[in-house]
Image (tube, rainbow, N blue to C red):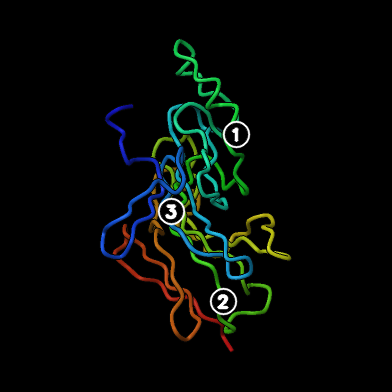
Amino acid sequence: MEKEERRANILEVNLDGSGEIIYASGLRNPVGMDWNPSTGALWTAVNERDKLGDSLVPDYMTSVKKGGWYGWPYSYYGAIKDPRWKDEPHDSLVQKAIIPDVPLGSHTASLGLTFYTNDAFPSTYKNGAFIGQHGSWNRANFAGYKVVFVPFTNGKPQQPEDFLTGFIAEGEESEVYGRPVGVTVAKDGALLVNDDDAGIIWRVAPTS
């Protein structure tokens, strides 16, 4: 673990490079980050660990508490111990691990995240979050390969919904057409999705 210095963390640093601190830790791979427009809280999408089976471990989206600890690598989803550490217990750290807010499916490789504050889409999308799922690489059946949307009600997240799909070839077990990663909102309110497999930036916009 001494080789993991500054890794699996969210860092806070001044614009001039000074004053670096660990804002939150135990986050295996927090890629997309954005500020909740309703509450001002920091949120992130986390790509979780592999090699515990097809159904473990869920990637997730969560609010980020300053100074918070989220379990990696000793536990997942709060205080569920990673069995690979059975000969070297870390009970004190496991017990204080924060449970994430929204599970996003195992091995979905949830990466990009952006909150939607524009008015171009229907009002149900306002202040919710889009997440790019790059897709699984070591799962018997594909997972991810899409963009999901997490609605928020009174500042609280609801169940994820499929938003942009069709990247997995119908009836195929090994063919995909693309892998969404980054998501961002254009000035006109359209959603831009970076697909690093097809080499395309998809633009999703309302029809009227």
Q: Secondary structure at mark 3?
A: strand
The residue labelled by disc 2 is: 117
Question: Where is residue 125 drawn, in percent x and y?
Answer: 63, 72
Q: Secondary structure at mark 1?
A: loop
Is residue 138 toward the left or the right of residue 93 in the image? left
Question: Where is residue 24 drawn, in percent x and y?
Answer: 46, 45
Q: CA distance from mark 2 to mark 3?
A: 20 Å
**Does residue 82 sit above or below 61 in this rendering?**
above
Q: Nearer the viewer, residue 204 or 103?
A: 103
Is residue 6 toward the left or the right of residue 91 in the image? left
Q: CA distance from mark 1 to mark 3?
A: 20 Å
Q: Residue furthest right?
A: 154
- Which one is earlier in the sequence, the residue at label 2 or at label 1? 1
Question: Where is residue 156 drawn, in percent x and y?
Answer: 69, 59
The kind of residue on which mark 3 rests is Leu
Q: Which mark is residue 145?
A: none
Question: Where is residue 206 drawn, in percent x and y?
Answer: 56, 82
The kind of residue on which mark 2 rests is Thr
How many labels were placed on the picture? 3
Q: Nearer the viewer, residue 18 or 46?
A: 18
Identify the residue at horizontal 29%, vertical 64% (top origin). Answer: 199
The residue labelled by disc 1 is: 78
- Which one is earlier in the sequence, the residue at label 1 or at label 3? 1
- Which one is earlier in the sequence, the residue at label 2 or at label 3? 3
**Does residue 156 sit above or below 207 in this rendering?**
above
